[in-house]
Image (tube, grey):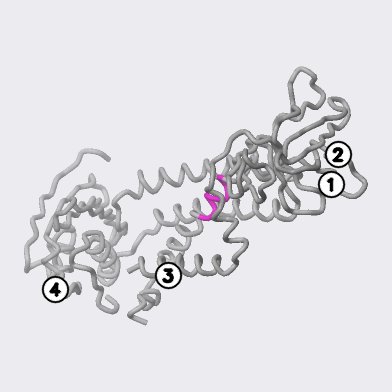
């Protein structure tokens, strides 16, 4: 027990123990609240996404990190430009959880009625009609689109792709982090 | 003191922390009652913020983003306000203080610090007897006075140093008769 430094735990008083726990938990909760803060500021449920496929090459590669902004709906206000044809948007098809990053090629209706968009990946031959929910030929800007792309950082997101495609890496990463915490206590 | 405290002789923060941690048990054995106000406030502030974050996570997870947008906004603002207060509390109020306690009406606050790369333990003790103005005492002693060559903290010289530095103890405790520390009492006029 002594070698691991765990014997120290026996002598820690409750306040000191709570203090250590607090320090650790504060890191996690601050990271989470920063994410939520960004989410509320951009009005998007997921303000930062990773490009998962090559359907937007050469503009975006697999693994690029995209920053989204969702406050341009062009609803009830003809003077604000709203989402334009040619913009790149990210959407989740209702029922599926994978974000798709494609370009707007056509728009229907709006601003008084729900804005409908047709999208297509730059690197794809056909438009996205096949990907939409059954019986639908368009996207609802308000309900399905989670934002338009306003900036990006290349390559950085590849780590999350690796982690989701090779789940053993998550365990390995957590194991290493846990080891570092224990060793550093000494 | 429980299982002999040990520190890495080459790591100044460890020497300081081990010495700091040894003050409370010693004073407790001499009849001082420790006041936990500083750390209690820190814990309350900290865990309130964490609970807010936890609640935000729970509602967002179960109800989805759209329904919880407004609540999340308030939660985020509240969280960072509390965190700012917490940071100020730790830096401004706790800063350096390692012990607060009282005995027989006398209250003391002990702060410690070390200079970079210098193995000397500096103590500042603010002591207030009932009906008198608080006095500030400073004391210092190299860590070598109470750490042996293997890094274990030796109780006797450490206890002597502490009791010599606290004015109300220096005169009365038997340990106060030996090893003298360079205590320089300073009267302060602030209430």
Q: Specify start and end residues of the magenta stretch as a single range.
A: A28-34
Q: SS for tag 1?
A: loop
Q: Nearer the viewer, mark 3 or mark 1?
A: 1
Say which label, 2 or 3, has the lower sequence index. 2
Q: Which residue is mark 3?
A: A179
Chain letter, disc 4 residue: B
- Asked whether A34 or A134 is in front, the reply is A134
Q: Nearer the viewer, residue B107 or B76?
A: B76
Q: Which residue was labeled with disc 2?
A: A138
Q: Main secondary structure of the magenta part?
A: helix
Please give the chain letter of the residue carrying mark 3.
A
| Residue A30 falls within the magenta-colored stretch | yes
Q: Position of residue B186 (x, y in %)?
A: 14, 45
Give me the C-alpha separation between circle 4 and circle 3: 30 Å
In the visual, does A155 lie left or right of A181? right
The answer to whether mark 1 and mark 4 are in CB contact below 8 A is no
In this rendered view, identify the residue nearer to me: B146 or A177: A177
Q: Residue A11's quadrant in the figure?
A: bottom left
């Amino acid at each position: 027990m002594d070698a691991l430094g765990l014997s120290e735990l026996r002598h820690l008083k409750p306040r000191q123990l709570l203090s250590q726990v607090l320090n650790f938990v504060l890191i996690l909760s601050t990271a989470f609240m920063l994410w939520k803060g960004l989410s509320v500021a951009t009005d998007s449920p997921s303000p930062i996404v990773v490009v998962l496929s090559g359907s937007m090459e050469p503009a975006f590669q697999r693994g690029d990190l995209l920053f989204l902004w969702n406050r341009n709906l062009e609803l009830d206000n003809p003077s604000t430009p709203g989402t334009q044809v040619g913009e790149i948007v990210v959407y989740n098809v209702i029922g599926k959880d994978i974000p798709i990053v494609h370009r707007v090629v056509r728009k229907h209706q709006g601003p008084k009625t729900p804005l409908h968009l047709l999208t297509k990946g730059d690197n794809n031959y056909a438009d996205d009609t096949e990907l939409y929910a059954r019986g639908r030929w368009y996207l609802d800007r308000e309900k399905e689109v989670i934002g338009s792309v306003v900036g990006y950082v290349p390559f950085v997101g590849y780590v999350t792709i690796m982690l989701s495609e090779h789940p053993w890496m998550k365990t390995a990463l957590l194991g290493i982090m846990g080891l570092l915490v224990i060793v550093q206590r000494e | 003191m429980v299982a002999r405290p040990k520190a890495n002789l080459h790591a100044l923060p460890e020497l300081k922390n081990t010495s700091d941690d040894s003050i409370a048990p010693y004073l407790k054995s001499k009849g001082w009652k420790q006041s936990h106000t500083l750390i209690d406030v820190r814990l309350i502030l900290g865990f309130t913020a964490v609970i807010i974050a936890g609640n935000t996570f729970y509602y967002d997870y179960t109800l989805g983003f759209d329904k919880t947008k407004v609540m999340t906004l308030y939660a985020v603002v509240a969280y960072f306000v509390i965190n700012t207060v917490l940071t100020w509390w730790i830096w401004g109020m706790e800063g350096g203080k390692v012990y607060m306690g009282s005995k027989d009406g006398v209250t003391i606050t002990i702060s410690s610090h070390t200079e970079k790369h210098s193995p000397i333990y500096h103590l500042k003790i603010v002591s207030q007897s009932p009906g008198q103005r608080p006095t500030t005492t400073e004391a210092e002693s190299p860590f070598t006075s109470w750490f042996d060559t293997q890094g274990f903290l030796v109780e006797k010289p450490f206890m002597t140093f502490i009791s010599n530095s606290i004015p109300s103890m220096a005169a009365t405790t038997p340990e106060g008769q030996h090893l003298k520390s360079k205590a320089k009492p300073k009267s302060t006029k602030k209430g």
